[in-house]
Image (spheres, rainbow, N blue to C red):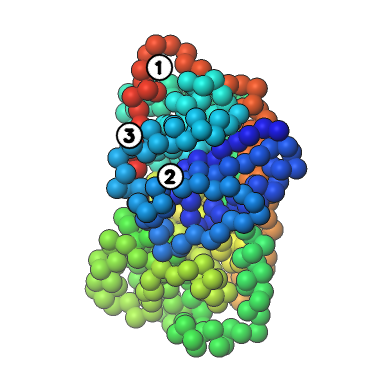
Amino acid sequence: MTNVVFAHTDLRLNWPALLRALHGYAGKRDVQLTVVEIAGHGSPYAFAGKSATGDGLRWDCLFPDQRMEDIPPRQAATSLFRHLDALAPDVVMAGAVAFPSGAAALRWACARKRGVILFDDARREDVPRSMLVNGVKRRLYSHASAVVVPAPSHDPTYLSWGVPQAAIFHGLIAIDNDGFATAVRSMQGQAPELRQALGLPPRFLLGVGRQVPKKNWAGLLQAWAGFCAAEPDAAAGCHLVLVGDGPERTRLELLTAELRLHNVVFRPFVAQEELCKYYRLASGLVLPSFHGESWGRVVNEAMACGLPVLVSRECGCAQTLVRLENGWVFDPHDTQAITAALRDWSSCAPQELKGMGAQSRAIVGEWGPDRFCRGVCDAIDYASSRPANYRSILDRILIGLWNGRYRPT
């Protein structure tokens, strides 16, 4: 039996379902899983809440009544280090070394000569870093026994940070595809009632996410204005619905008024069950993010619900999930390119969009919980025989001093 601890800062959204699946899958491979969460409150996704895991999965929370941003990094890392000592796993799997969970896990594994797996979705192109920072990243990541990343599109970053190709595993970003698909199927025949209850238009393009600069909602509104001006007849039957909140909300509402857009609807964040209603009624999903969108999980959700997608080429998922048969990829810095994608979407008949949505389901079906579980368990097998160790006095000092930091975006 291999004892594994899965540690991270705050496990919300899709994590409970994924970890339930991993617990069952790992048990069949003689792996005992324990989950350790540092903070019990807060995070940018506090609205989502958390569901009980059940199934006998042990789930510890070190600071159940605190937000991650209120816990000093050294305190968080020290507490996790001590908890790992108490659990004494054979392998510890934790978030990126930029966070206290990854920093503490790496330090503990090196000190105790155990396997350590880091999971991360960062790409070097998303956040420009100095040569010094990339050098430090390389020193830290080169000590990992293995890493789990979303897809092969992310491999070059970790290869540049000293991780061998054989130590890179895939499937990190996954959602409960069947759960989303089932939720949408359960609403079959209810569209008119749902539309009336939610006050949604007959044909709309959906945007879901935090309203922060990197999401480029302002650029989308500019492009939507261009689309409405260039294609008034098509635009007359289309709406843009933006679901989310954030520091840019007021600015976006003012921009909408300034552009005289009367076919844009703003809605606050909603729970997953409610969001599925929006996916059920939408005619497509758009994600116009700039750099910094390391993946774009809402694209997985929309595709699982059978939607075509319009995705920025700078989103990490674009290369893996978006193809000619299920959507459009555009340059987020080029307003005309976004407008062109909007025009292409609007020109598709309902049946054509439905066919593209079916393709979306098939594509994202290859990147669900099974892929996540398989990637993690393969990484565990690999890491079990490759314990971490300090390679030099300098590395010992660096890993010993670094406690990570928590910067929600």
State whether residue 248 is above or below residue 263. above
Q: Answer left or right for 122 relative to 148.
A: left
Instruction: Check contact, mark 2 vs mark 3: CB within 8 A.
Output: no
User: SS at mark 1?
Assistant: helix
Q: Which mark is residue 396?
A: 1
Tell me the amino acid under the disc marked 1: Arg
**Whole-Å distance between the Cαs marked 2 and 1?**
26 Å
User: SS at mark 2?
Assistant: strand
**Relative depth, front residue between 354 and 45:** 45
Q: Say which residue appears at 61% left-offset and 21% top-offset.
A: 386
**Relative depth, front residue between 135 and 363:** 135
Task: Specify few, some or many for label 3: CA neighbours under 10 Å numbering under 14, 14-19, or 20 or more.
Answer: some
Residue 278's spot in the image, x, y percent? 51, 74
Q: Which residue in the protein does label 3 denote?
A: 74
Tell me the amino acid under the disc marked 2: Leu
Tell me the amino acid under the disc marked 3: Arg
Q: Which residue in the protein does label 2 denote?
A: 62
**Relative depth, front residue between 227 and 46:** 46
Task: Report whether residue 225 is seen.
Answer: yes
Question: Split into 4 quadrants, where in the image is the N terminus?
Answer: top right
Sequence-wise, which precedes: disc 3 or disc 1?
3
